[in-house]
Image (cartoon, rainbow, N blue to C red):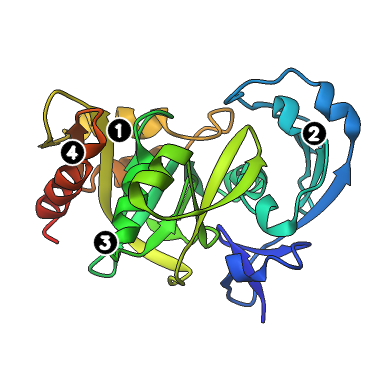
Amino acid sequence: MLRGAYGFVVEGLEGAESLLVPVEPGWPILAVRWVEDPDQANATSGAEAESTVRFTPEGAFIDVGSSGVVEIQRDPAVATFRLPAIPDRQALVHPYLGWAASIVARWLGREVFHAGAFVHDSKAWGVLGTRTAGKSSMLGWLHREGFPIVADDLLVLADSSALAGPRSLDLRDDAAERLGVGKPVGRVGARERWRVELAAVPWSVPVSGFVFLGWGDRVEVVGVTGRERLTRLSVQLTIPEIPADPQGLLDLAALPALELRRPRDWRRLDEAGAALLRAIGA
């Protein structure tokens, strides 16, 4: 059985099949290779280092500091990861696979966002926000409440449908402790991770709308206007170097969108989650 994620048949991840989803014959192939390169350990590090992308005529090069580098060949699509040390294949699925998939998906004309997504009433809601907006903790709460998670940190859309990401959700230690979920997998990428295994979802789920996360003095859910939706979606595109399709982005901005605000207080997470579910009619 072919397996993959983000709309690709993924080759080279033997041992991590449980984190991938069954895929359709004829899907594009993304092959991955892993090279241990101790010199990468001497690269500039940071708690959450930003990746930098450089494009070449043959492909792309992603520098992620002390996490390593990713060399991507465009045709055929091959991603070579040069890492200080090679962790087990399951740990490599996220975030490394997402770095490569985001670029190859853009080459195919798919829109890619720094976002997660969950399923309600057989449709997906994208969850977007800045790095510290609480996306993973909200997705962890939704998972705990029984809502299927389509994607954790990278949302790939094709024809206004969300393509399933790996079957894992990564949390920080405080979120894992508060939610009572996740197993430590050590330092993967730029930080320590607690991994939650996710149930299977369809490989493609139509998108119903978007939820933007923010902080506030109280829990509240407010609507987001059309022009503001377009701006907020544009900000969360992962590869701005490859311009989005204007009409496709306008079509996405026409979908319903909400902003969920909550205090930075773990005791209010249940209240915030319940307010979100009421707002989308769950």
Q: Tag 4, which secondary structure? A: helix
Q: Which residue is mark 3?
A: 145
Horizontal and vertical percent position of residue 50:
60, 24
- Packing grade of label 1 (10 A; few <14, some 14-19, many >=20) is some
Q: Tag 2, which secondary structure? A: loop
Closer to the camera: disc 3 or disc 2? 3
Q: Give the quarter of the image for residue 27.
A: bottom right
| Kind of residue at disc 1 | Leu
Alpha-carbon span between mark 2 and mark 1: 31 Å
Q: Which mark is residue 8?
A: none
Q: Which residue is mark 2?
A: 57
- Asked if residue 17 is positioned above or below residue 272 in the image, the reply reads below
On the question of residue 159 being in view, the answer is no
| Kind of residue at disc 4 | Arg
- Packing grade of label 2 (10 A; few <14, some 14-19, many >=20) is few
Q: Residue at x 27, y 46 (%)?
A: 210
| Residue sitting at the far top | 44
Q: Earlier in the sequence, mark 3 or mark 2?
A: 2
Q: Residue at x 55, y 57 (%)?
A: 6
Horizontal and vertical percent position of residue 52:
66, 24
Horizontal and vertical percent position of residue 2:
67, 76
| Kind of residue at disc 3 | Glu
Q: Which residue is mark 4?
A: 268
Q: Earlier in the sequence, mark 4 or mark 3?
A: 3
Q: Residue at x 55, y 59 (%)?
A: 166
Q: Earlier in the sequence, mark 4 or mark 1?
A: 1
Q: Residue at x 35, y 33 (%)?
A: 129
User: In the image, is 216 to the left or to the right of 145?
Assistant: left
Q: Which mark is residue 230?
A: 1
